[in-house]
Amino acid sequence: MRRISKFYGSSQALKDVSLKVESGELVALLGPSGSGKTTLLRIIAGIEDADPGSGKVLFDDIDVSSTEVGKRRIGFVFQHYALFKQMSVFENIAFGLRSKPRRERPSNAAIRAKVEELLTLVQLQNFARRYPNQLSGGQRQRVALARALAVEPQVLLLDEPFGALDATVRRELRRWLRKLHDTIKVTTIFVTHDQEEALEVADRIAVMNAGKIEQFASPEEVYERPANPFVFRFLGNYNLFHARHDGGPHRHDEPENATPVTFVRPHDVEILRENPDGSAIAAKVTHIGFAGAAVNVELLRHDDQQPIDAELTNQAYRDLGLKQDDEVFIRLRNSHSFYEDYAI
């Protein structure tokens, strides 16, 4: 995608977006509602057009911006399956093959072989004669994926593919999708607002906000080295610390009159019983909450009365022997500093 822009009336959904997805890569478009994720996906598919003169969509360096959707070799999977209720699982998967022009249509034997191959791939080989209303949500989504793959797409596009499913099924299906992608290696782009989903499944993540891409990098990089405060905030819980300038000269890369703010994840807040070198921050434990494998500890700083959230393993919690109202010290690991004048 090269410099793609899109207006809906006076509202700009995409602002000069460029993105290069490598062949065989699985990329997530991640962001809040209204960030432009689905609009970008629909422009890639050809379901919508970018604004005239704004940019191009290229597959293997071939401009497909003017190519109609049916000729782009796109597989598209929607959040709500869009299966044909009156068709069996077998016929749903075969639909794209049977709909091809006569001269391009495979023989009935070839269609049967392809559908059986896909049923095995999506682990539904015993469900060929069932109808969508006889399947679970996770099974229906696997049928939708098989149908999209039947036409051997150049690019597979998934729009919130697991959004209609409950949390347990979503976890199972995203692991399954990752294994499926490792098997078939088709270039895949999927839209999600679920940070955990993107971090677990994608090779790279494009974090979108207000029609722009804020960062495009590996899951590890966007989480451990966020490009700006928006990415840090969107990718999980955080603590915010305001710094005070010491009155000395500004660094060359430091904006004038800007105050640095520091972000720290709760699991990067270390709780200590003592302060041997005097560098830790004095605080008081105000609440302890158990969350399965983790223990969430709420604290209050003594110096500025600001709350701090910490996340401990069960073992670390037991070793410390924490109780409410305990006086402790905290130390920050893996902190990230930005400037307050950054527009979010």
Image: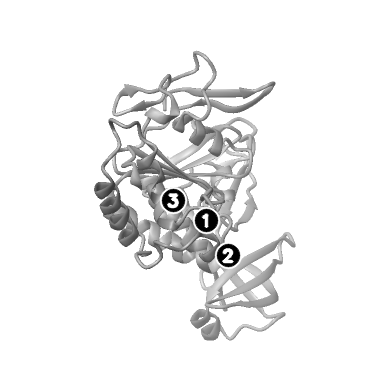
- Looking at marks 3 and 2 on the same chain, the residue that comes earlier in the sequence is marked by 3
Q: Amino acid at mark 1?
A: Phe
The quadrant of the image that shows the N terminus is top left
Query: Residue 263 location, x and y as percent?
Result: 57, 52
Look at the image and tell me in which quarter the C terminus lies.
top right
Residue 279 seen anywhere in this rendered image of the structure: no
Tell me residue 294's x, y (percent): 55, 75
Residue at mark 3 = 92
Is 160 left or right of 153, judged from the image as shown? right
Q: Nearer the viewer, residue 56 or 214?
A: 56
Pick whichever of labels 3 and 1 is earlier in the sequence: 3
Mark 2 highlights which residue? 166
Give x and y (percent) for residue 83: 51, 50
Secondary element at tag 3: helix
Q: Which residue is mark 1?
A: 162
Nearest the eye: 211 or 8: 8
Alpha carbon distance from label 2 to label 1: 8 Å
- In the picture shown, does residue 337 fall above or below 61? below
Label total for image: 3
> Left or right of 70: which side holds 107?
left
Q: At label 2, which amino acid type do we have?
A: Asp
